[in-house]
Amino acid sequence: MLVVEDEDAIAEAVRARLQSEGYDVVVASDGPEAIRRHAEHRPDLVVLDLMLPGLDGLTILKVLRREPLNGDVPVLLLTARREETDKVLGLETGADDYLTKPFGVRELVARVRALLRRPRASQLAAGGASPGVGPVTAGPLKLDPARRQALIDGRPIDLTPHEFDVLYLLASHPGIVFTREKLLERVWTNDTHVTERSVDTLVKRVRQKIEADTRDPQLVLTVWGTGYKFADA
Ligand code: CA
C-alpha cells in the first residue's frame, strides 16, 4: 500500500506499524512522488495526508481517481482536527474513509483492514456479483450480491438491479456519505439519461421497501445538500 505523508515522524510510524501487520508499504512525501508511486506499484490502498506541500491531498486524489488502472483504489484520508469542510470535500472527491489527526496506529490499522474488505467500485460496476464480494449485514438488512438477494428482518424483498446496487454500495459503507453524482457514476455507469433526480426517486422506492416508516428513515439517511448515507450502527 501507499502512504502519502510529508511529516517524517507520522510517515515512519504508519509505515512501521503497517509493515509489522504484514503489509507492503511504500512512502511518498509529496504529490508528484505519490502519483508516480501509485502508477509504479498500483497499491491496494492509499493512506493520503490532506495537507501536503505543493499538491494537496485532494488534488492528488482527483488525479488518482482518473487513472484508468487502479483508479478505484481505496483511499483513507488523514486530516487535521476540525477540518470538517475538508472531510466532506474529501468524501465527495472520492475518498473512502478519513481519520482525524492525532490518531492511534491501532485505529489506523482497523480502518485499513475494513477498507481492504470492502468491495471495490470496479467490482460493483461490473455487475455487483463479482466473485469474492461478500454478503453485507447492516442492522436488519442482509444483502447477498452473489444471489442478488435482499432480506429485511429475514423477509425477502424485491429490488431492481439498480436498487440493489445503490443499497449495496451504501450498506457496505455505513456512515460514508455518497453524493447523488457519485451514486450515478458508480451505479449507472453506462446510462447517460439518468439525472440526480433519478437517484432521489430510487432512494424513495428503496425506502418504501426497507423502512418501517418512510417519513422517518432509519437505514438510508438523507444528508441535506449532499446526498445519502447508510446509518452507522
Ligand atoms: Ca502534512
Image: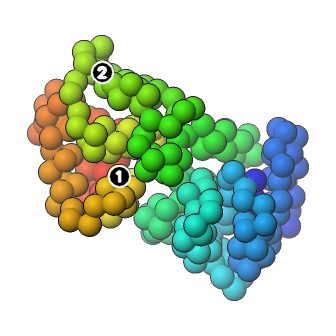
Under mark 1, the amino acid is Val
Relative vertical location of residue 177 with respect to residue 174 in this rendering, above or below: below
* Quadrant occupied by the C terminus: top left
Residue 214 sits in quarter: top left
Q: In the image, what residue occupies the spot 35% across and 29% down?
A: 148
Left or right: 221 as drawn, with respect to 102? left
Relative vertical location of residue 102 with respect to residue 30 in this rendering, above or below: above
> For mark 1, what is the residue?
187
Left or right: 185 as drawn, with respect to 42? left
Element on which disc 1 rests: helix
Task: Please state the horizontal and vertical placement of residue 75, each as a whole percent of the image.
Answer: 60, 57
> How far, Cα to Cα, is label 1 from label 2?
21 Å
Q: In the image, what residue occupies the spot 15% across and 44% down?
A: 204
Task: Please state the horizontal and vertical placement of residue 127, each as a whole percent of the image.
Answer: 41, 43
Relative vertical location of residue 217 with respect to residue 59 in this rendering, above or below: above
> For mark 2, what is the residue?
151
Colour scheme shown? rainbow
